[in-house]
Image (tube, rainbow, N blue to C red):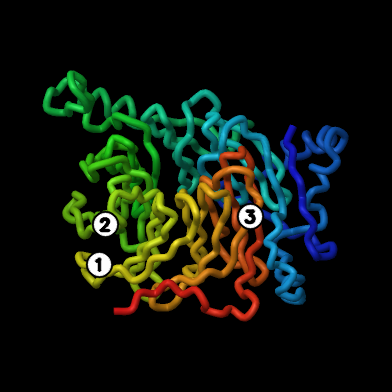
C-alpha cells in the first residue's frame, strides 16, 4: 500500500480541474476511469489519507491562490508530498502525460497519477535495475543495468497500461548481423560483442528528431531510430564511462563523462561527428549535463567535486568558452534539470537541491536551497510549464522516496549576490 504524506500548504479548497492524458485515446480514458473506480472504495477504507491527499489541492488552480500569498511563505520550500513505494533507491524520473514515472535500482517502475499523486500502477519488475527512462509519444524507453533498452507502449485496451513491446537490440537487428564477423567488436580480452550491443550498463538516454541516444559505462554512444528501433551507429565517444546525455532542439547531443569532458555531437549526412569538447576540472567526473538555447547555446555540467560549470558555444558550436563555475554543493553533483530556460536545479550527494537563476549571459546565482531528503538526491524532473507563478519540481533519492516541491519564480528581493559569471 502506498505511503504518502501531504505537507501543510497555505491554500484553501480549490475546484477540481479536468485532466486528460495526451498519450491515451478517448477509449483509453475509460480504462483509467474503470481502474480508478474499482480501487476507490478499497483505498478509501484502507488508507483515508491516501484517497483524500489532494482533495483540496489541484495543480491547475494553484495559480489563483499563489498569486495572493506573500513570497515569505515559501522560503523553507516544504515538500508538498513524500511518495514511497520503491523497494530500491529511486534512480530516474520522467513525465508521461498526466503521469509521473519513477524508476528504481529495485527494478520497479511506479506510475503516479496527477493531481492527487496516488500510485496508479507498477511495471518493469524483473527486467534489471533501471538506470534511465525517457518518454516520447505513446512510448516509454527504459535503460537497464543488463545493457538492454526496453520499449513500453501505453496500451489503449489492456488493463496493463504500460505494455512491453520490444527490447533493444531487437531480435531482427541481432539476427541480421550476428553471422558476419565484421559486425563484432572486442569489448575486453578474449570477449567480443556485436557493435549494436552495449557491453556494460546503460546509464543515460536522450531523445531527438526521431532518434534515441544511449550512453553507457562501456564508453560508447549508440544511435537508434525510433520508427523501426534499429541501431544505426555506435560511437567510441569517451575515455571513461558516460554518465549523462542531453539533446538540444537543434539536434546536437551532449554527452558527459567520468573522463571530465562534455562532448557535442551533430548528425551530418546520416552519421554523427564530434563538434566540440568542453573541458571540466582535471580528474573530476562530470555526472550530469543540461543545455539551454535561450539567448544562445549554454551548456552546464555537474561534477563530482560539487561544482556546476557553464559554457557558451559559438554559432558553429566548434568553439566553447567557460563562462561560469560555482561551488554548488559540498559533495558530488549527481543530477540537474532546467526549468523554463530560467532556472537550473542541481541535486547532490549532500542530500540537498540548489535552485539557480540564470542570467541572460549564462551566469548563475543562487536562488534557494531545498533540504528534506534523507539520502543523496539522484534525479530531478521539473514540470513542463508554469504552475501558479512558479513550477513543480520532483526529486528522487537514495532514501527510496520521491518528493514533490513547488518553487516560486520570485524570491525575496531576487538579489544577485552570488553571481558565478566569469568576466575576462
Res 162 quadrant in image = top right
What residue is shown at x 36% (from left), y 30% (from top)?
147
Q: Tag on residue 264? A: 2
Number of on-image labels: 3
Q: Pointer 1: what residue? A: 320
Discs 1, 2 touching: Cβ within 8 Å: yes
Discs 1, 3 touching: Cβ within 8 Å: no
Badge 2 crowding class, 10 Å Cα cut-off, few under 14, some 14 to 19, many 20 or more, is many
User: Could you say which is closer to the camera, residue 192 or residue 44?
Assistant: 192
150 on left or right of 275? right
What residue is shown at x 51% (from left), y 60% (from top)?
345
321 on left or right of 139? left
Badge 1 crowding class, 10 Å Cα cut-off, few under 14, some 14 to 19, many 20 or more, is many
Closer to viewer: mark 1 or mark 3: 3
Q: Tag on residue 346? A: none
What residue is shown at x 24% (from left), y 72% (from top)?
315
Q: Position of residue 404 (x, y in %)?
A: 65, 53
Q: Position of residue 328 (x, y in %)?
A: 48, 60
First in sequence, mark 2 or 3: give its number. Answer: 2
Quarter containing the N terminus: top right
Distance Cα–Cα, label 1 vs label 3? 34 Å
Q: Position of residue 258 (x, y in %)?
A: 32, 45
First in sequence, mark 1 or 2: give its number. Answer: 2
What residue is shown at x 31% (from left), y 56% (from top)?
281
Q: Pointer 3: what residue? A: 371
User: Could you say which is closer to the camera, residue 303 or residue 111?
Assistant: 303
Question: Farthest residue in the front direction?
Answer: 330
Q: Is residue 357 visible?
A: yes
Amino acid at each position: 500500500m502506498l505511503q504518502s504524506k501531504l505537507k501543510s500548504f497555505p491554500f484553501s479548497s480549490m475546484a477540481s480541474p479536468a485532466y486528460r492524458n495526451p498519450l491515451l485515446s478517448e477509449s483509453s480514458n475509460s480504462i483509467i476511469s474503470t481502474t480508478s473506480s474499482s480501487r476507490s472504495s478499497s483505498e478509501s477504507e484502507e488508507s483515508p489519507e491516501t484517497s483524500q491527499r489532494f482533495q483540496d489541492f489541484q495543480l491547475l488552480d494553484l495559480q489563483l491562490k499563489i498569486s495572493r500569498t506573500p513570497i515569505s511563505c515559501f522560503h523553507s520550500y516544504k515538500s508538498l508530498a513524500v511518495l514511497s513505494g520503491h523497494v530500491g533507491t529511486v534512480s530516474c524520473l520522467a513525465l508521461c502525460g498526466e503521469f509521473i514515472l519513477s524508476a528504481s535500482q529495485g527494478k520497479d517502475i511506479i506510475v503516479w497519477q496527477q493531481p492527487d499523486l496516488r500510485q496508479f500502477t507498477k511495471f518493469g519488475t524483473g527486467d534489471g535495475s533501471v538506470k534511465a527512462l525517457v518518454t516520447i509519444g505513446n512510448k516509454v524507453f527504459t535503460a537497464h543495468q543488463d545493457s538492454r533498452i526496453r520499449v513500453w507502449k501505453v496500451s489503449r485496451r489492456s488493463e496493463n497500461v504500460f505494455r512491453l513491446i520490444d527490447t533493444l537490440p531487437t531480435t531482427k537487428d541481432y539476427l541480421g548481423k550476428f553471422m558476419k564477423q565484421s559486425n563484432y567488436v572486442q569489448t575486453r580480452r578474449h570477449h567480443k560483442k556485436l557493435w549494436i550491443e552495449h557491453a556494460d550498463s546503460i546509464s543515460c538516454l536522450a531523445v531527438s528528431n526521431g532518434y534515441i541516444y544511449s550512453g553507457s559505462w562501456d564508453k560508447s554512444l549508440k544511435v537508434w531510430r525510433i520508427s523501426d528501433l534499429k541501431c544505426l551507429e555506435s560511437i567510441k565517444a569517451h575515455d571513461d564511462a558516460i554518465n549523462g546525455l542531453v539533446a538540444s532542439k537543434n539536434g546536437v547531443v551532449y554527452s558527459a563523462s567520468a573522463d571530465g569532458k562534455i562532448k557535442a555531437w551533430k548528425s551530418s549526412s546520416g552519421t554523427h561527428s564530434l563538434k566540440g569538447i568542453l573541458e571540466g576540472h582535471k580528474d573530476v567526473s562530470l555526472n550530469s549535463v543540461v543545455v539551454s538555447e535561450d539567448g544562445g547555446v549554454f551548456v552546464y555540467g555537474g561534477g563530482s567535486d560539487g561544482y556546476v560549470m557553464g559554457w557558451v558555444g559559438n554559432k558553429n558550436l566548434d568553439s566553447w568558452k567557460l563562462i561560469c563555475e560555482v561551488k554548488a554543493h559540498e559533495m558530488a553533483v549527481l543530477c540537474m534539470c532546467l526549468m523554463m530556460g530560467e532556472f537550473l536545479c542541481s541535486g547532490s550527494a549532500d542530500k540537498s537541491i540548489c535552485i539557480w537563476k540564470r542570467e541572460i549571459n549564462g551566469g548563475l546565482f543562487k536562488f534557494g536551497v531545498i533540504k528534506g531528503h534523507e539520502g543523496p538526491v539522484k534525479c530531478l524532473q521539473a514540470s513542463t510549464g508554469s504552475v501558479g507563478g512558479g513550477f513543480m519540481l520532483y526529486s528522487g533519492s537514495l532514501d527510496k522516496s520521491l518528493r514533490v516541491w513547488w518553487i516560486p519564480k520570485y524570491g525575496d528581493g531576487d538579489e544577485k549576490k552570488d553571481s558565478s559569471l566569469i568576466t575576462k
